Image (cartoon, rainbow, N blue to C red):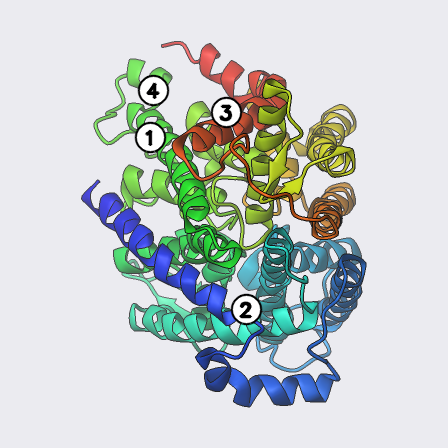
Amino acid sequence: MVSIAVLLLIAALLAKPVGLYIAKAFDYTPTGVDRVFGWIEKPLMRLSGIKNNNQNWKQYVLSILCINAFMILIVYAIFRLQHLLPLNPSDIAAMEPTLAFNTAISFMTNTNLQHYSGESGLSYLAQMIAIVFLMFTAPATTFAAAIAFIRALAGKPLGNFFVDMIRSITRVLMPIAFVTALVFVSQGVPQTLEPTVTATTLEGAEQSIARGPVGSFLAIKELGNNGGGFYGVNSAHPLENPTVLSNMLQMLLMLLVTTSLPFAYGKMIGNKKQGNVLFAAMGIMFVIMLTVSLVAENAGNPVLNALGVDASQGSMEGKEVRLGVAQSSLYSVVTTASETGGVNTMHDTLTPIGGLVPLANMMLNTIYGGIGAGFINVLMYAIIAVFLAGLMVGRTPEFLGKKIESREMKLIAITLLAQPILILVPTAIAVTLYPETISNGGFHGITQVIYEYTSSAANNGSGFEGLGDNTPFWNISTGIVMFLGRYFGLVTLLAVAGSLLAKKAVPESSGTFRTDNGLFATLFIGTVVIVGALTFFPALVLGPIAEQLTLKP
């Protein structure tokens, strides 16, 4: 518990300075940061023909869609041809077409849902050239979109997507990932191009140990809120997460950018109090979720308790003994609150309420949220909160000096409806037509399916790993959900940003609803709970809540 407090304290202390740095790094006026990174950025932009000109929201969105679609095609080809390409010492075969389709979309959408086993599904070249490449460009895409959204709220031009994406990589992701990769290697994480090694165990048996460029993979996996594992069991593998220090550093990296964005937002709009309020509101929701998870997992399974199984250490099913219940619960909350998706415990083995917490984190997608996209969702709920407040007092709602009118609310309403449709409709189809792929019956089986599609729609990537999900149905259906879950919301919310940017600012008056105080923080949390949580409450009742109620000693 002390280590949990230390980790959260470090994350909170780093959030503000990192946020202020991000605001400066994306400032189009000349700063000292330009001199540090200009030597690499200028040749890249000159070689690519990128000009530092402002785009409107349609041009920004078109740039995102075109470059991301091109990258999906490139990595799909690599997956299909990896058996013919170099750096494949283990002679791994080409990916099956629907699996390659799913994997390419998964990593391009920052989801990293893996329907393959990491160490046996991809060659070293595919891991480095395709996977790690997307682990930088996917978060850089949504990072850039979030910065553009904030600029629009501040009444400034959106900027240029290609410039913002390059800056995301060169000024934030690459430097931090480079340093932390060295730290991971120092902790015992492999970093080699040598093939799988065979070792003799103490019992005299032979064991094959997969190796590879894991350290560099791991750093951007966590920092970019990607979450895909080099190994099939992700960060539960002793080579991907060898020490307590590596475990804590992984969680710190997941939180680093996501917790700093509220402070970058406050700096960029010229009202630091607003950033502080959003940071505090999200922090309160995070602590509540963490507390529920810790209580549920430490209580253990009442059925096993009744059978006399020692529950003094809580529910240890599916957890690493060297990490224990507390670090496993914390990791499950951090990885879903930050929309990362990496795991150091098997979420399928969590208690019903312990499994409900990561599921709810993904459904809300506002408790810090993934790098960029999650913070856009936070601002969407902030706009909804202002709109509801305006309705209650009979005034035209205003947010940062711009009137919130029917056009913006229609776009937001469509965005809100998209996620439950993307989750619940495929869930109904899967449960009805493909029950043989679900390893558990009853309520837990329903939770498995809901979790898979929630993870896909929220671009998280963690899973209840009891599904037989490497089939054409699951590969194609989750691939479509991941694609729409990522790009539909980006398009609609950037359209909201463009609409607000085009409006004239309304002078603040005594009747203006303030969005930088405790009242707004309370209203924001209430909006997330009422609008977000209640949308999925019936589904949660059919899954984890019903399962919890049926666990009788």
- How far apart are the alpha carbons under marks 2 and 3? 32 Å
Q: Going by the image, does 3 lie left or right of 434? A: left
**Dot 3 amino acid type:** Gly
Q: Bin the neighbour count of mark 4 within 10 Å (Cα to Cα): few under 14, some 14-19, many 20 and up.
A: some
Q: Which mark is residue 291?
A: 1
Label 1 SS: helix
Instruction: Tell me if residue 210 can be seen.
Output: no
Q: CA distance from mark 2 to mark 4?
A: 53 Å
Number of residues whose C-alpha sits closer than 10 Å to that of mark 2, classed few (under 14), some (14–19) or many (20 or more): many
Where does the C terminus fall, quadrant-wise? top left
Q: Is residue 551 above or below residue 2?
A: above
Q: Is residue 413 left or right of residue 232?
A: right
Residue 273 pos. (x, y %): 41, 46
Name which of mark 4 and mark 3 comes first in the sequence.
Answer: 4
In this figure, which residue is indicated by the disc labeled 2?
26
Comes first in the chain, label 2 or label 4: 2
Give the spatial CA distance, label 4 vs label 1.
22 Å
Please name which of the two marks, 2 or 1, marks the residue nearer to the observer: 2
- Tell whether label 3 touches label 4 (CB within 8 Å): no
